[in-house]
Amino acid sequence: MGIATVNPATGETIKIFESLSQEAIAQKLAIADETFKAYRTTSFKQRAAWLHHAADILDARADEFGRLISLEMGKLLTMGVGEVNKCAMVCRYYADHGADFLRDRPVKTHASQSFVAYQPLGIILAVMPWNFPFWQVFRFAAPALMAGNVGVLKHASNVPQCALAIEQIFHEAGFPVGAFQTLLITASQVAEVIADERVKAATLTGSEGAGASLAAAAGAHLKKTVLELGGSDPFVVLESADLELAATTAVQSRMLNNGQTCISAKRFIVQESIADAFAEKVVQKFAALKVGNPLAPETNIGPLSTSAIKLEIEQQVKDCINAGATVLFGGDPDAIALDPGLVPDNFYPPTLLSDIPADAAIAQQEFFGPVAMMFRVPDINAAIALANDVPFGLGASAWTNDPGERECLIRELEAGAVFINGLVKSDPRMPFGGIKRSGYGRELAAEGIHEFVNIKTVWVK
Ligand code: NAP
């Protein structure tokens, strides 16, 4: 379909956009480059004021932007509004703390004066996914702009109106024209942007394939990248855990964003002695979820963002069954009773699969939909071994009330984040990112703002 708004709930094509020509891209990069020359010298106080203004716009128009998110990618309206409010939060966070993170840091050496200075790099390219179409962009843009960089955004092709709305928000907030621009381009045009010498670095949130492709293009030009990629996060539940709370959180995590969240609990790894009780609770909770119109307040699960995602999840469930899995709940999209006006192409029901052989190839894949795999393990050592036995390492959630087990899980789980007795989530105050094939580099917190700056060593005799 190219770059277009297609309502995933109704199948209606709402707006189609032309991708930018080579000349138009060059023109936007020229504007960004020109803007950077002056923008880099603006004060932290000025940038913070613009970020605060952006936050106020986001909060004031959260309902409008939440509806736009829902229209383009099918998120529940309440979740879309929450996402927009969280963007306001990250703008305020960097407005309030950015100057501290970037202040010259004195270091005692034998020089008469020595310190570390943090300076902006220039134009940073952000390639972003559709699943959190506002949040992913703001968590890049707020620190980048606070640090004095300028940004160009290549957003996912199915959320062009979100991309344009974000550009407009930064303009209305007072940032100079050229400080943040949306490039409506296809994935195949990304390499050309990276190759431009005015673009200094790039970040991508998305699939492994896209990440590898961006990193290769950037590597050819010796440019830094940060990659936030996929995950198949473990949700480990041991005997001493609060089972009810663990089951509630597992369901919440897996179903978040209609199952399309990188840090969802995707593999429930449960100690054998409590596995049946845990599965029973999860099944009860899945059964209570209503699948349907993302704008209706009673809906718990909206559509998948595209029919391609539904086809993929359908195939993955079939592969699990062929590998020997038992379907404990769901698995049949035709059984969903949809309200009139909704098209079945993009809906998939909450599904719980058990008995997947741990060594099956399918057990290694990320499931980007409302489908959970459950595995039974005899003890904590087997739980950790299985949790780590995937190519990914994004976020891990582990449930226990035993202090020894807790320490062991914190230290041994291979992931960019470990949450004990809690839902894995991002928070502007804490760094966010992965290891292994989930990517490298960090966003958010002090670590995030330090990714795209020149960390300059200064030494004065
Ligand atoms: P995707 O296909 O990789 O798309 C993400 C972005 O990359 C889009 O803007 C896409 O543009 C672009 N893109 C695709 N192929 C490219 C290429 N060869 N070169 C340059 N850009 C390219 O990702 P997705 O499948 O839509 O998103 C889901 C994935 O993102 C999942 O794996 C999920 O776990 C991951 N994710 C990770 C995080 C995290 O923080 N770690 C957060 C959210 C999502 P087009 O739309 O034009 O193809």
Image (tube, rainbow, N blue to C red):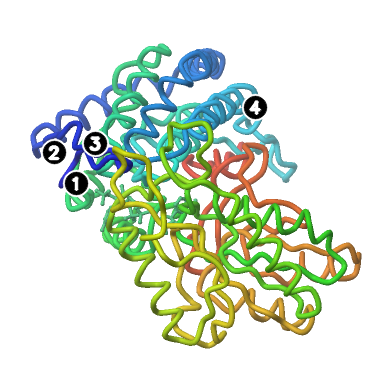
* Distance (Cα) linking label 4 and label 2: 37 Å
* Distance (Cα) linking label 3 and label 4: 36 Å
Q: Residue at x 36, y 60 (%)?
A: 334
Asked if residue 205 is positioned above or below residue 51 in the image, the reply reads below
Q: Position of residue 142 (x, y in %)?
A: 49, 30
**Lower position in the chain sequence, tag 3 or tag 4:** 3
Asked if residue 365 is positioned above or below residue 69 in the image, the reply reads below
Q: How many marks?
A: 4
Type of residue at label 3? Thr
Q: Position of residue 161 (x, y in %)?
A: 28, 29
Residue 155 visible somewhere in the drawing = no
Residue 200 location, quadrant: top left
Q: Residue at x 44, y 59 (%)?
A: 368
Residue 457 location, quadrant: top right
279 relative position to 150: left or right: right
Asked if residue 461 is positioned above or below residue 301 in the image, the reply reads above
Nearest the eye: 123 or 248? 248
Q: Secondary structure at mark 4?
A: helix
Q: Which residue is mark 4?
A: 97
* Distance (Cα) linking label 4 and label 1: 35 Å
Residue 5, labelled with which disc? Answer: 3
**Lower position in the chain sequence, tag 3 or tag 1:** 3
Type of residue at label 2? Ser
Mark 4 or 2, closer to the camera: 2
Q: Residue at x 69, y 53 (%)?
A: 249
